[in-house]
Image (cartoon, helix red, strand yellow):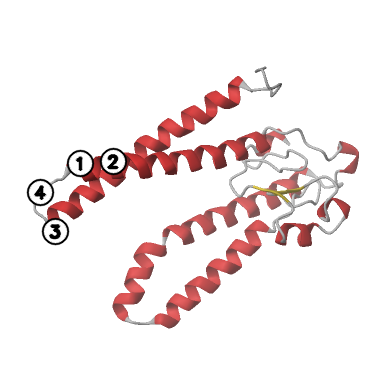
């Protein structure tokens, strides 16, 4: 504990530092390569007095944001569940596994759709068919909505969302609470944020 009385979690600090270093290195390498290629294309030479400070500053900013957001997600994932076992739905393991598989398949479909944006967007613009771009965006919104509003098969709360204590969602209207951001949301969570049901390790049910 420091002089101000604020508790500092050494493990959380270590995790944030690891995330920062990892993402700083990735962002710096990518930015430096892109800036260098741009300089060679436009000027035929590499200006380190510009490219190095630029790449370092943007990489540092990106790494800080990544550390903060990912650190918050990890801390939330580590939070103890608030839904008691007595509140679990009476569903057998077969149904639980089937619904968990549905959530995982939707996650794969959503992330695949996101990754298709660059090649598919370039192809659509090349053939000059903007209607397909609109169709792609609509499909992305629908898949994202289905995924983000997935409910846990064990506690029936939203899998990737946890309402703040005393908020609208905590009083029963979780959908309204989620729409207005009155809670914690993590699309990358490996477990239900409310009861702790694991998404990847189905045998742990």
Q: Under tag 4, what secondary structure?
A: loop
Q: Marks 4 and 1: which is nearer the front?
A: 1
In the current view of this chain or complex, which residue is farthest to the right? 86
Q: Looking at the picture, how far across and down is residue 92, in whole percent?
A: 80, 45
Which residue is pictured at 43% across the width and 42% down the height? Answer: 61
3D distance between C-alphas at marks 4 and 1: 12 Å
Disc 1 crowd, CA 10 A, few/some/many (<14, 14-19, 20+): few
Q: Looking at the picture, how far across and down is residue 49, in whole percent?
A: 20, 41
Q: Marks 2 and 4: which is nearer the front?
A: 2
State left or right for residue 176 relative to residue 123: right
Q: Give the residue at mark 3.
A: 42
Q: Are marks 1 and 2 in contact (CB under 8 Å)?
A: yes
Q: Give the residue at mark 1.
A: 49
3D distance between C-alphas at marks 3 and 4: 8 Å
- Which label's residue is closer to the chain start, 2 or 4? 4
3D distance between C-alphas at marks 2 and 3: 19 Å
3D distance between C-alphas at marks 3 and 1: 16 Å
Q: Looking at the picture, how far across and down is residue 181, in whole percent?
A: 70, 56
Q: Give the residue at mark 4.
A: 45
Q: Under tag 2, what secondary structure?
A: helix
Disc 3 crowd, CA 10 A, few/some/many (<14, 14-19, 20+): few
Q: Are marks 2 and 3 in contact (CB under 8 Å)?
A: no
Q: Under tag 3, what secondary structure?
A: helix
Q: Looking at the picture, how far across and down is residue 1, in whole percent?
A: 67, 17
3D distance between C-alphas at marks 2 and 4: 17 Å
Question: Residue 53 shows which numbered tag?
Answer: 2
> In front: 130, or 2?
2
């Amino acid at each position: 504990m420091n002089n101000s009385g604020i508790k500092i979690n050494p493990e959380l600090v270590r995790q944030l530092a690891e995330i920062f270093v990892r993402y700083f290195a990735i962002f710096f390498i990518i930015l430096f390569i892109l800036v260098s290629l741009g300089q060679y294309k436009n000027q035929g030479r590499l200006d380190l007095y510009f490219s190095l400070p630029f790449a370092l500053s943007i990489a540092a900013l990106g790494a800080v944001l990544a550390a903060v957001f990912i650190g918050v997600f990890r801390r939330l994932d580590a939070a103890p569940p608030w839904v008691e076992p007595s509140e679990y739905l009476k569903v057998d393991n077969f149904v639980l596994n089937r619904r968990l598989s549905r959530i995982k398949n939707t996650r794969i479909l959503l992330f695949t759709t996101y990754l298709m944006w660059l090649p598919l967007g370039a192809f659509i613009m090349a053939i000059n068919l903007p209607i397909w771009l609109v169709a792609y965006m609509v499909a992305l919104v629908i898949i994202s909505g289905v995924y983000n509003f997935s409910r846990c098969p064990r506690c029936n709360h939203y899998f990737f969302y946890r309402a703040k204590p005393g908020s609208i969602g905590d009083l029963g209207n979780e959908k309204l609470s989620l729409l207005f951001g009155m809670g914690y949301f993590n699309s990358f969570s490996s477990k239900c944020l409310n009861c702790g049901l694991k998404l990847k390790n189905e045998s742990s049910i």
